[in-house]
Amino acid sequence: MSQEQELTRGQIDQLDFLHNVIYNVICELCPGSNIPEWDMEIIGEIADLIEEHFVKKGYCTAQEFNPYLLDEEAPSYDKANIQRSLEKEQNEKSNNSTV
Protein backbone atom coordinates (compact mmCIF):
# COMPACT_ATOMS: atom_id res chain seq x y z
CA MET A 1 0.00 0.00 0.00
CA SER A 2 1.51 3.34 -1.02
CA GLN A 3 1.50 6.34 1.25
CA GLU A 4 -0.36 9.37 -0.13
CA GLN A 5 1.94 12.31 -0.72
CA GLU A 6 1.12 15.91 0.10
CA LEU A 7 2.89 19.19 -0.47
CA THR A 8 4.20 20.90 2.64
CA ARG A 9 2.82 24.26 3.80
CA GLY A 10 6.04 25.89 2.56
CA GLN A 11 5.68 24.30 -0.88
CA ILE A 12 2.05 25.41 -1.12
CA ASP A 13 3.07 28.94 -0.12
CA GLN A 14 5.80 28.92 -2.80
CA LEU A 15 3.32 27.80 -5.47
CA ASP A 16 0.79 30.47 -4.43
CA PHE A 17 3.53 33.12 -4.47
CA LEU A 18 4.85 31.98 -7.86
CA HIS A 19 1.42 31.87 -9.51
CA ASN A 20 0.40 35.25 -8.08
CA VAL A 21 3.64 36.93 -9.19
CA ILE A 22 3.31 35.53 -12.71
CA TYR A 23 -0.33 36.63 -12.95
CA ASN A 24 0.62 40.12 -11.73
CA VAL A 25 3.35 40.33 -14.38
CA ILE A 26 0.86 39.26 -17.06
CA CYS A 27 -1.52 42.00 -15.90
CA GLU A 28 1.25 44.62 -15.84
CA LEU A 29 2.50 43.71 -19.30
CA CYS A 30 -0.92 43.46 -20.93
CA PRO A 31 -1.48 46.62 -22.97
CA GLY A 32 -4.53 48.75 -22.29
CA SER A 33 -7.22 47.87 -19.81
CA ASN A 34 -7.93 44.41 -21.24
CA ILE A 35 -6.59 42.46 -18.25
CA PRO A 36 -6.84 38.71 -18.83
CA GLU A 37 -8.66 36.43 -16.43
CA TRP A 38 -6.72 34.03 -14.21
CA ASP A 39 -5.67 31.18 -16.51
CA MET A 40 -3.60 28.40 -14.92
CA GLU A 41 -2.66 27.01 -18.33
CA ILE A 42 -0.87 30.26 -19.26
CA ILE A 43 0.49 30.81 -15.74
CA GLY A 44 1.82 27.23 -15.69
CA GLU A 45 3.47 27.57 -19.09
CA ILE A 46 5.24 30.76 -18.02
CA ALA A 47 6.28 29.16 -14.71
CA ASP A 48 7.72 26.20 -16.61
CA LEU A 49 9.74 28.46 -18.93
CA ILE A 50 11.16 30.47 -16.04
CA GLU A 51 11.87 27.27 -14.09
CA GLU A 52 13.77 25.78 -17.04
CA HIS A 53 16.05 28.82 -17.25
CA PHE A 54 16.58 29.12 -13.49
CA VAL A 55 17.50 25.43 -13.18
CA LYS A 56 19.74 25.59 -16.26
CA LYS A 57 21.59 28.60 -14.80
CA GLY A 58 21.88 26.83 -11.42
CA TYR A 59 19.89 29.44 -9.46
CA CYS A 60 17.74 26.79 -7.81
CA THR A 61 16.28 23.35 -8.31
CA ALA A 62 12.99 22.76 -10.07
CA GLN A 63 11.55 21.55 -6.76
CA GLU A 64 12.58 24.76 -4.96
CA PHE A 65 11.18 27.05 -7.65
CA ASN A 66 7.97 25.24 -8.62
CA PRO A 67 7.30 22.52 -6.01
CA TYR A 68 5.70 19.28 -7.11
CA LEU A 69 5.00 15.83 -5.74
CA LEU A 70 7.61 13.30 -6.74
CA ASP A 71 6.32 10.81 -9.25
CA GLU A 72 8.59 7.84 -9.82
CA GLU A 73 7.35 7.57 -13.42
CA ALA A 74 7.89 11.26 -14.25
CA PRO A 75 11.11 12.35 -15.96
CA SER A 76 13.73 14.16 -13.92
CA TYR A 77 14.20 17.82 -14.82
CA ASP A 78 17.68 18.28 -13.49
CA LYS A 79 20.25 20.53 -15.11
CA ALA A 80 21.78 17.73 -17.20
CA ASN A 81 18.42 16.63 -18.61
CA ILE A 82 17.48 20.20 -19.48
CA GLN A 83 20.83 20.75 -21.19
CA ARG A 84 20.39 17.57 -23.23
CA SER A 85 16.88 18.65 -24.23
CA LEU A 86 18.09 22.08 -25.28
CA GLU A 87 20.94 20.59 -27.31
CA LYS A 88 18.57 18.15 -29.00
CA GLU A 89 16.18 20.99 -29.83
CA GLN A 90 19.04 23.06 -31.28
CA ASN A 91 20.21 20.10 -33.38
CA GLU A 92 16.71 19.52 -34.70
CA LYS A 93 16.38 23.19 -35.64
CA SER A 94 19.77 23.09 -37.37
CA ASN A 95 18.84 19.95 -39.29
CA ASN A 96 15.49 21.41 -40.35
CA SER A 97 17.03 24.66 -41.55
CA THR A 98 19.48 22.80 -43.83
CA VAL A 99 16.71 20.88 -45.61
Image (cartoon, helix red, strand yellow):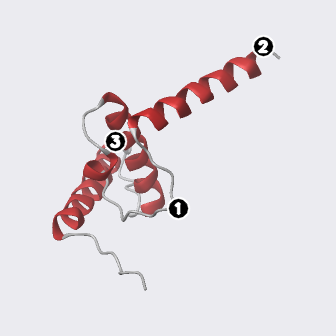
Extreme-right residue of the structure: 99
Screen quadrant of the C terminus: top right
Tell whether 18 sits left or right of 43: left
Looking at the picture, how far across and down is residue 68, in whole percent? 35, 61
Q: Position of residue 58 (x, y in %)?
A: 29, 32
Q: Quadrant of residue 39?
A: bottom left
Which residue in the protein does label 3 denote?
Answer: 29
Rendering quarter of residue 8: bottom left
On screen, residue 56 above or below 18: above
Q: Which residue is mark 2?
A: 98
Q: Earlier in the sequence, mark 2 or mark 3?
A: 3
Quadrant of the snapshot with the N terminus: bottom left
Kind of element beneath mark 2: loop
Residue occupied by mark 1: 73
| Label 3 to label 1: alpha-carbon separation | 37 Å
Identify which residue is drawn at 34% across, 42% down. Answer: 29
Q: Nearer the viewer, mark 1 or mark 2?
A: 1
Q: In this rendering, would 85 be left or right of 96?
A: left
CA distance separating discs 1 and 2? 36 Å
42 and 7: which is toward the camera? 7
Residue appearing at x 40%, y 41% in the figure: 78
Cα separation between marks 2 and 3: 36 Å
Kind of residue indicated by mark 1:
Glu
Secondary structure at badge 3 equals: helix
Q: Earlier in the sequence, mark 1 or mark 2?
A: 1
